[in-house]
């Protein structure tokens, strides 16, 4: 025979299940007859960004005839509200639900910009590699990429490059801006020194930055940071620099760490034959005046 304690436990379980069933039935009945008395919009990440406001979200629902205020619960589609809000390029996620107090709650998270494109069109690329428009309400403090930026480039090569810079403490502090020229070659604007860095394409960018870092740590610490107006990383195994205000080419060669004369500085990068790059005129990129952050 079952003990008294087992009987009491069974009765408690039955009572709990019965109460839960009653509440579900009552909730369903309330859902049919309750009239919505308010719309409560919540920006869950409002403390970090304000690309869109609660008022603007309510206006979106108004314009689509989805504002639930004054409507019976049974005629309110929370799924339709969610679908409409997700059409907005500034919104990443949304959840809509009804409360027993007669209010419809809409919870929204905004998309997170990773960097800003400034050119013929200005827009952000977010952390999901998607494009998002510039907001009139809020300007994100993110890295700036200027020039002739193709959209497929923005969500692929540039996204990967910015991610690499962000994860490296040295480059995160050193590179101020990325510029894409009309010929689609990439230039970098450093925070220290006046030289523009010509990287060329994004191919092998990790190796190019390693060579540049060796130049910074082994070469510029000897001859100074403001002596050159151009640093060219396009040559395999060497870095070619141009002295400010002169045409002679400065060739950064392997196998030594010394300053030979006023036109050549040598830094050990890779065991290759010594070569001299052809002379080229260099147009120095001026820094953008737009607000930006370090990468």
Image (spheres, helix red, strand yellow):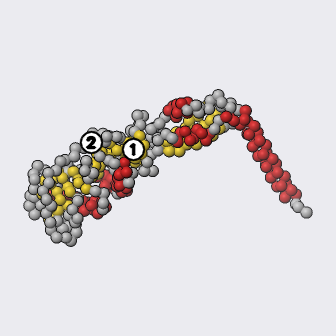
Q: Residue furthest left?
A: 261
Asked whether residue 101 appears in the rendered view, the answer is no
Label located before the other in sequence (2 or 1): 1
Point out residue 258 in the picture as x, y percentages from the top left corner: 14, 65
The residue that label 1 is drawn on is: 124
Residue drawn at point x = 35 percent, y = 40 percent:
122
Q: Of residues 271 and 76, which is closer to you in this image?
A: 76
Element type at mark 2: loop
Taking the image as shown, residue 122 lies to the left or right of residue 192, namely right
Q: Quadrant of residue 203?
A: bottom left
| Whether label 2 touches label 1, CB < 8 Å | no
Taking the image as shown, residue 128 lies to the left or right of residue 29, namely left
Q: Nearer the viewer, mark 2 or mark 1?
A: 1
How many other residues sit within 10 Å of disc 1, few (<14), some (14-19) or many (≥20)?
many
How many other residues sit within 10 Å of disc 2, few (<14), some (14-19) or many (≥20)?
some
Q: Quadrant of the N terminus?
A: bottom right
Residue drawn at point x = 46 percent, y = 44 percent:
111
Point out residue 237 in the picture as x, y percentages from the top left corner: 22, 66
The residue that label 2 is drawn on is: 288
Point out residue 180 in the picture as x, y percentages from the top left corner: 28, 49
Q: Residue furthest top?
A: 70
Asked whether residue 151 appears in the rendered view, the answer is yes
Element type at mark 1: strand
Residue drawn at point x = 58 percent, y = 38 percent:
81
Residue drawn at point x = 25 percent, y = 56 percent:
200
Point out residue 82 in the picture as x, y percentages from the top left corner: 57, 41
Taking the image as shown, residue 156 lies to the left or right of residue 90, namely left
């Amino acid at each position: 025979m079952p003990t008294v304690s087992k009987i009491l436990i069974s009765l408690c379980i039955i009572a709990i299940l019965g109460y839960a069933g009653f509440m579900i039935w009552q909730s369903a009945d309330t859902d049919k007859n309750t009239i919505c008395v308010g719309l409560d919009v919540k920006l869950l990440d409002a403390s970090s960004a304000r690309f869109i406001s609660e008022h603007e979200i309510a206006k979106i629902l108004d314009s689509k005839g989805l504002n639930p205020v004054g409507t019976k619960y049974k005629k309110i589609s929370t799924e339709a509200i969610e679908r409409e809000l997700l059409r907005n390029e500034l919104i990443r996620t949304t959840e809509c639900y009804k409360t027993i107090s007669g209010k419809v709650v809409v919870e929204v998270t905004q998309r997170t910009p990773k960097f800003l494109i400034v050119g013929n069109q200005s827009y952000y690329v977010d952390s999901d590699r998607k494009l998002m428009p510039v907001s009139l309400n809020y300007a994100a403090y993110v890295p700036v990429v200027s020039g002739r930026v193709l959209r497929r480039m923005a969500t692929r090569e540039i996204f990967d490059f910015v991610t690499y810079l962000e994860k490296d403490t040295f480059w995160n502090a050193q590179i101020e801006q990325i510029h894409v020229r009309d010929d689609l070659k990439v230039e970098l604007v450093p925070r220290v020194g006046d030289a523009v860095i010509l990287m060329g394409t994004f191919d092998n960018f990790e190796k190019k930055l390693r060579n540049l870092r060796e130049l910074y740590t082994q070469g510029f610490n000897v001859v100074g940071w403001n002596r050159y107006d151009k640093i060219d990383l396009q040559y395999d195994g060497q870095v070619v620099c141009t002295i400010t205000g002169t045409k002679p080419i400065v060739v950064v060669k392997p196998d030594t760490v010394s300053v030979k004369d006023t036109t050549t500085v040598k830094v050990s990068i890779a065991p290759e034959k010594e070569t001299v790059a052809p002379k080229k005129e260099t147009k120095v990129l001026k820094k953008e005046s737009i607000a930006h952050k370090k990468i």
